[in-house]
Image (cartoon, rainbow, N blue to C red):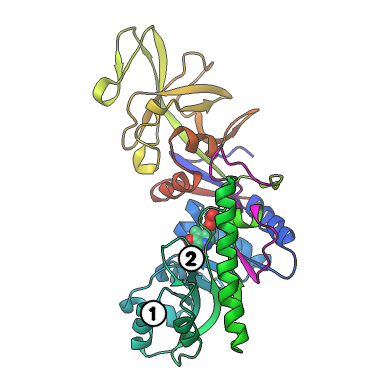
Amino acid sequence: MKINNGRAWAEIDLSAIRHNARLFSEMVGKDCKVVPVVKANAYGHGDIEVTKALNEIGYDFFAVATAHEGQRLRVNGITGEILILGYTALQDLEIVVANDLIQTVLCEDYAEMLESFGKPVRAHIKIDTGMHRIGFDFSDIEHIERIYKSNVIKAEGIYTHLCASDSPEQSDIDFTNLQKDKYFSVVNALREKGINVGLTHIQASYGMMNYPEIKADMARLGITLYGVLSDMNNTLRYEKPDIHPALSLKARISMVKDLQKGETVSYGRLFTADKNMKVATVSIGYADGIPRDYAQRGAFVLVNGHKAAVIGRVCMDQFIIDVTDAGEVKQDDVAVIIGKDGDAGISVEEVAQRCGTISYELFVRLNCRVDYVYINK
Ligand SMILES: *Cc1c(COP(=O)(O)O)cnc(C)c1O
């Protein structure tokens, strides 16, 4: 199907998202529930559409970062459980309760704040096993135990987060195994005291791929739900699962023109034509999520299956490409920034590598102004 859309758009293949979710559900086995992580507008893929597509095939437990993200899902008819992975301020706890969301308990001080709210709040307890971001220190059994006995905080689960599970370095493997051991030392200590700890979870995408031997009740599926890895250099400890990228990013060519040798392109005149050239303007810019230094990073796009280098500074709403060797290019042709064009393709991992970041960041930059087109609903 040729999609004939407007100025700039992200094309999201929902069948790829369903495929990836099912693939990981099979990987972790039937005793573990895959929890799709749909924070930050489902990593820029559109939270409502993505979560609905997963709800329809039976996924009934989701994770978000904020109370407002959880509320948005509820308002749009998402059923099942929704866990907030981060901090919610006192003034927003009403949103948590009113929408039947599950709040993470960050630490003892945070627990006291939750209790001061007065109304019962469903919760999962976060344990810090080495990331030092949020969570009770793993050795603080006394306070963790207290939370399970609170009249206000209804603890239904306990989890931790791995901070180096994507690394094949032996020192990181040792560290990750230590995190796992610290986590289970807490869980076992609580169980020995006769406490029902509720749902256990540790792994995110890389934890599932690199530490499949970890057994817990749930696993949180983020980046690989969207069918990609963090970056090109990622070395997995086992064979890469057959994930399918869900997102393509495309924009319309607004104008094609000739450039004479010696003429310059865009703000600051960073690019000078060293010969007579044909250039084209693409209608997407840094306000849409394209890094401003894209050309200086050696980026290119695909036009009619040909590579076309990005030249000069990326502007807020548009950038310019060299189409001298890209065949017949005309106004309204489509430039592929991420995705396939005939036999050629540009992966988000490749773009991330070029831009000195990870695919996560490129995805979440995307959500402000591009159109969203969903295929294979
Ligand atoms: C974002 C997040 C995830 C998802 O991680 P991926 O690497 O994208 O799979 C899981 N757990 C927590 C606590 C997170 O913040």
Say which of marks 1 and 2 sits in front: 1
> Residue type at mark 2?
Val
Mark 2 nearby-residue class (10 Å; few <14, some 14–19, many ≥20): many
The percent coordinates of residue 138 (x first, y second) are 49, 72
Q: Is residue 22 above or below residue 237?
A: below
Q: Name the residue: 38% across, 43% down.
A: 288
Label 1 Cα neighbours within 10 Å, binned few <14 / some 14-19 / many ≥20: some
Depth check, front residue: 277 or 230: 230
Image position of 8 (left or right of 196):
left
Quadrant position of the N terminus in the picture: top right
- In the depicted structure, whether residue 256 falls above or below residue 24: above
Is 359 inside the magenta-drawn segment?
A: no
Asked where in the image residue 22 lies, by quadrant, the reply is bottom right
Mark 1 and mark 2 lie on one chain; the one further toward the N terminus is 2
- Residue drawn at point x = 63 percent, y = 69 percent: 218
Q: Which mark is residue 108?
A: 1
Residue 48 visible, this orientation: no
**Residue 103: percent from left, percent from top:** 46, 76
Considering only vertical position in the picture, is 26 above or below 301? below
Boundaries of the magenta span: 210-237
Secondary structure category for the residue under label 2: strand
Q: CA distance from mark 1 to mark 2?
A: 22 Å
Taking the image as shown, residue 216 lies to the left or right of residue 10, namely right
Tell me the residue at 49%/80% (across/down): 141
Q: Amino acid at mark 1?
A: Glu
Residue 1 visible to the viewer: yes
The quadrant the C terminus occupies is: bottom right
Dot 2 corresponds to which residue?
Answer: 64
Element marked by disc 1: helix
Q: Main secondary structure of the magenta part?
A: loop
**Is 183 or 171 nearer to us in this picture?**
171
